[in-house]
Image: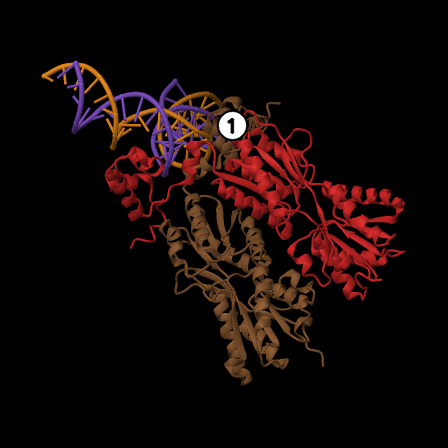
Chain colours: A red, B brown, C purple, D orange
Amino acid sequence: MADRPDSRSRGVSIKDVARAADVSVATVSNALNHPELLSADTHTRVMRAVEKLGYVRSESARQLRAGQSRMLGLLVLDMRNPFFVGMAHGAEQAARADGLGVMLCDSSQELAAEEFYLGLFAEQRVRGALVTPTDSSTTSLSVLRRHGIPYVFLDRVASGDEACSVSVDDVTGGRLAVGHLLEQGHRDIAYLSGPMSLPQCRDRRTGALQACDEAGVDHDAVTVVETERLDVDAGRDAGSRLLGLSPRPTGVFCANDLIALGVLQTLVAAGVAVPDDIALVGYDDIDFAAAAAVPLTSVRQPAAQMGATATELLVREIAGAERHVHENVEFAPELVVRRSSITRH
Amino acid sequence: MADRPDSRSRGVSIKDVARAADVSVATVSNALNHPELLSADTHTRVMRAVEKLGYVRSESARQLRAGQSRMLGLLVLDMRNPFFVGMAHGAEQAARADGLGVMLCDSSQELAAEEFYLGLFAEQRVRGALVTPTDSSTTSLSVLRRHGIPYVFLDRVASGDEACSVSVDDVTGGRLAVGHLLEQGHRDIAYLSGPMSLPQCRDRRTGALQACDEAGVDHDAVTVVETERLDVDAGRDAGSRLLGLSPRPTGVFCANDLIALGVLQTLVAAGVAVPDDIALVGYDDIDFAAAAAVPLTSVRQPAAQMGATATELLVREIAGAERHVHENVEFAPELVVRRSSITRH
DNA sequence: CATCGCGATGAAAACGATTCAAATGAGTTA
DNA sequence: TAACTCATTTGAATCGTTTTCATCGCGATG
């Protein structure tokens, strides 16, 4: 019952097993990795010793010898946003199916954190990385490139032929959202955007303006309110700013659902009726959108599928290293209309 | 601009740097880890070579030599539950402050996944683990024990002196919730519980019954409806079952907010008014509870703080391995009353 | 002048696994 | 009996670091 070994010890190594089974370390290794090479007798003898000693192989020694790990790195912008959790989930499932583990990290939209974690990925020699980049973070990715670690962009179109990527057509997403508001008759529209340094935020605005063009409405109809972050707190804050605008917009498009939920709270608290006084449209269609105080109209992105697809692209790139051609898979967004945007007549 | 090395190559190693800087590998290692030992001249020469070659040290080689990693393993029950994400966030912050990375894994409440990930932790020789166990999973933890990897239970009281743990007094939590419903005059109460194999679910029921005792109400007042999982889907499902009960309960206590949100959706869809027809109380007080269709009364648990505290306990155990005494830190739950449970008179 | 001390550097041995080529040994064939 | 085959098993090299201990050069001291 020596369950708790001396804390100075290094634990059970392959040598200990070899000694216990009275074979060489090579045989133990073969028993674990190429059982077909061994006689049945030897194999069971080794496995019994493994069992008895509770041997667990050292992944670091393994990796060192192999030169690479069996891990993918996954860096997301914000784990408190269910949309990213959804992508992570899809990616993990797909990776496990390929026998790969996933190392999940959260950059919290901070460049410093992003660089820290990408450095960690490089140190760990991950087999590949899935990255939701903060800024035009081509620089921080050079650490991966230098070590020949392939990466795929998640929720972001790769520029040129830098890498594979999985994205959603955000221009169309913005067009759907604002087109819907215009259709409902709104002519004073606010776009509550996250930081304009994010391409997603820029593209959704472009889409919003396109919708104006299509409806023959002047671009002035859309006021942009920029927030620093993309979370509920920022939404609450943006809500206050929204109420200070004059004329006060009657249709509001939020860069994501968290912001929309924050805005909704502020509006409800201020006695502003949704959708009657202000119609609201979010983005991502997270589970909680449907359960909101006023069920939220939102632009749906297929989060889990995006994660899974990105993993598949990455795995394919890893496998066919030589003749790999980068590609971008673009998903179509889908408008899900709920009560928050439907004005009663 | 040899950014992309030959894919067969192993990348830049410490030897390459040594050659480039015309020093020994030992000197390169020292430049990185003990710069005070070197002359300023040599140091800058080495660093320049590191920079130029884009050298990143191999964590696996490092670990192999050191016998342990600089990582903590964190295994949560369900990453799609913001409560666990909150704990993970708190834990990560605390770990980063101690220069430790966190490997985040999601068991999805499945024993097989739990065992897989604990095995992974052992293979990686993580420095320590934070675990939210599914069942009475002392068995799967033996793999950690055997390798002398310390672990701390998160959101679960450790039995005996097995390990440190961080928990919330779930009995009190249940008592607060049901006490509140009883105070509001409800005498037909349902407890929508997750699997009774989870101590949290059992304790909350115990608390519910205690509240009955205190109010001089018979235990029969509380009907238990058990669900298999603890997510929104399960909640929707439980909502239907709830509507089939007769007499139909007027006060409902849910084992967590996700279930409560699911129930809420079913009730709203069925035209049942909350709180007038049915009063609803959730658990965890996730951010989305306040933004729900009907703002949700909930029992708050300090998620981030729990994660941070658990990390601190673990770090302390790692540091003072010899004279460590396990301890349990128990937080107090707090009832946050919102509209979902307040019957208008 | 010989010796000592000291700062700076390097040679070599670990760490734990995998793998390849070589050794062993039993059975088969000429 | 000698040569050969084939299935098992093993010795030794290797991966990239860190660390210990020895060495080297040089100014200072006796």
Please state the horizontal and vertical placement of residue B128, each as a whole percent of the image: 45, 51
Judge the density around disc 1: few (<14), some (14-19), many (≥20) Cα neighbours within 10 Å.
Answer: many
Query: Which residue is at the front of the view, A165 or B41?
Result: A165
The quarter of the displayed image where residue A340 is located: bottom right
Please state the horizontal and vertical placement of residue B116, each as a whole percent of the image: 44, 49
From the viewer's perspective, tell me whether residue D14 is left or right of residue A151: left
Query: Which residue is at the front of the view, B37 or A296?
Result: A296
For image coordinates 59% across by 76% down, the residue present is B249
A175 relative to C3, above or below: below
Q: Which residue is mark 1?
A: B11
Report the chain holding disc 1: B
The quarter of the displayed image where residue B52 is located: top right
From the viewer's perspective, tell me whether residue A107 is left or right of residue A262: left
B53 relative to B323, above or below: above
The C terminus of chain B is located in which quarter?
bottom right
The N terminus of chain B is located in which quarter?
top right
Q: Amino acid at mark 1?
A: Gly
Please state the horizontal and vertical placement of residue B273, each as a whole percent of the image: 69, 72
Q: Is residue A183 visible?
A: yes
Please state the horizontal and vertical placement of residue A7, each as a whole percent of the image: 36, 50
From the viewer's perspective, tell me whether residue B242 is left or right of residue A181: left
B53 relative to B299, above or below: above
Spot the residue most to the bottom: B216
Element class at badge 1 = loop
Count of numbered circles in the view: 1
Q: Is residue A119 visible?
A: no
